[in-house]
Amino acid sequence: MITFVPEPHLLESPRGREWPVLPGTRAAVTAEPPSAADVVVVGAGPAGLAVASALWHHGVTDLVVVDRDGRPCGRFFDRIDLLGQRVLRSPYEHHPGVEGYRDCELLDFARLHWSVLTPVERREIRMAQAGHRSVVPVDVFEAYCRHLAASHHVTERTWRGSVREVLPAGVSSDAVTVRADRFSVTARHVVLCLGEERRSAPDTWWGGGRPPRGVSYWDEPVPDGGNRLAVVGAGLTAAHLISNGLAQGREVHWVVRETGERYQCADVNSSFFRPEGRARFDGVSWSERLELMGRFRRASIMFEFRPMLEAAEAEGRLIVHRGKAITKVTTGVGLHLEDGSRVSVDHAVLALGTTPSIGDGLMPDEAVLDRGGWPRLDERTFAYLGAPRVFAVGAAAGMALGPAARNIDGHRVATARVAATVAENLRRDLPLRTATKDVARV
């Protein structure tokens, strides 16, 4: 048996290079969006960018994108930079492009900017062209997302705002109201691209609420100072935090609930990126889907980290506590493990995974039809069964599309269906909309 172990230097692409910018790129020119639109996209991460770009190809331009950061993919890259991440897990063929159109894809974009790339990055492009696995630099991906946002006029249709409510008027109504902190927009369709939020620690660890002093979550800055760092979690985020701590010369303790780490290329089984893998969810019962999601949507680490982490453990710079769940966290910082042992460190970072944002808290319960943390969706169009004019793209579509829904490749599949459905609905509604405008003019 041959084990695939790529070299750690693949993780070290440069960050912050200068990339050509399309002329005329501009942000939204008004403080508030129009009060009405054909489509509102909530969230401008990779999923929201894909949806807005796809709608442009369908000729849908009466579009408002509302994002808490106000920059396409801004929060996505802020989180990545907080971790010091230099490459993506997704390969070149997985990107926020538009299925079914001869658009500029990520590999095309990278080849167009060949002179900016390092020799290692050029080799990875050749690997991708040959059909082999390759890693994508964050720098290339961010520049590509900026290009996509500019060339599909997404930047100028994006407004900053924190959405408070999404209110469908009813199953038979053709209007949905999106209320943000500073404005409201009434739309004929809404696409929720809400992504995922960090998973909180169990209340039993310290009684709930904010963590005790010396403990933070992965999406918060890790304070300087202190020689001993603990990282709790088994995924790629934990690996980056560990790598950062080791690079700073700290003694790092890694607490892993399972008995061993999982290394793999993608964060879900690669079969789910293919049509035959996604078809495993078609016609399968809810309980079977839950079982598949539990089995394949699990934390794992890119293979590139394996030699580095194994060497650090052998040298004693990394102490791994395997198969030991935490029972209590105390100020000090003490991590109490289920076997009765205690790990004492200067600071602990929790990387406990994420949970999909499914629209609960924004929409009424009868619109979400929450079933164990998952919304009820039309499995062909990804529309909410309780709100047919509202759609989900991203992790929230997991129980309809499968584990790949949370990945960029899954965004492409969901986007293609949602954009086509929205565009067809708008075409069908056109006579009614025209008549309404004529009456208003009279």
Image: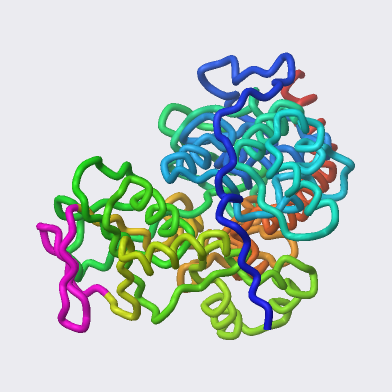
Q: Is residue 198 left or right of residue 359?
A: left
- Name the residue rendered at 63%, 84% in the picture: 285
For the image, the number of numbered tags is 0
> Between residues 239 and 27, which one lies in front from this camera angle?
239
Against 277, is 410 above or below? above
- Name the residue rendered at 87%, 44% in the picture: 101
- Residue 289 image point, x, y percent: 60, 79
> Between residues 14 and 222, which one lies in front from this camera angle?
14
- Residue 341 image point, x, y percent: 16, 77
Q: Quadrant of the C terminus?
A: top right
Against 175, is 259 above or below? below
Q: Is residue 392 visible?
A: no
- Name the residue rendered at 55%, 34% in the picture: 15
> Between residues 415 and 120, which one lies in front from this camera angle?
120
Against 141, is 405 above or below? below
Asked if residue 268 lies in the magenta stretch, the reply is no
Q: Quadrant of residue 344?
A: bottom left
Q: Is residue 223 left or right of residue 12?
A: left
- Residue 374 image point, x, y percent: 52, 67
What's the coloring here? rainbow
Magenta highlight range: 326-346
Q: Is residue 131 left or right of residue 40?
A: right
- Name the residue rendered at 63%, 61% in the picture: 6
Q: Quadrant of residue 304?
A: bottom right
> Between residues 79 and 391, which one lies in front from this camera angle?
79
Q: Is residue 5 visible?
A: yes
- Residue 60 image point, x, y percent: 78, 35
Asked if residue 335 lies in the magenta stretch, the reply is yes
Q: Quadrant of the N terminus?
A: bottom right
> Which residue is the extreme one toward the right?
102
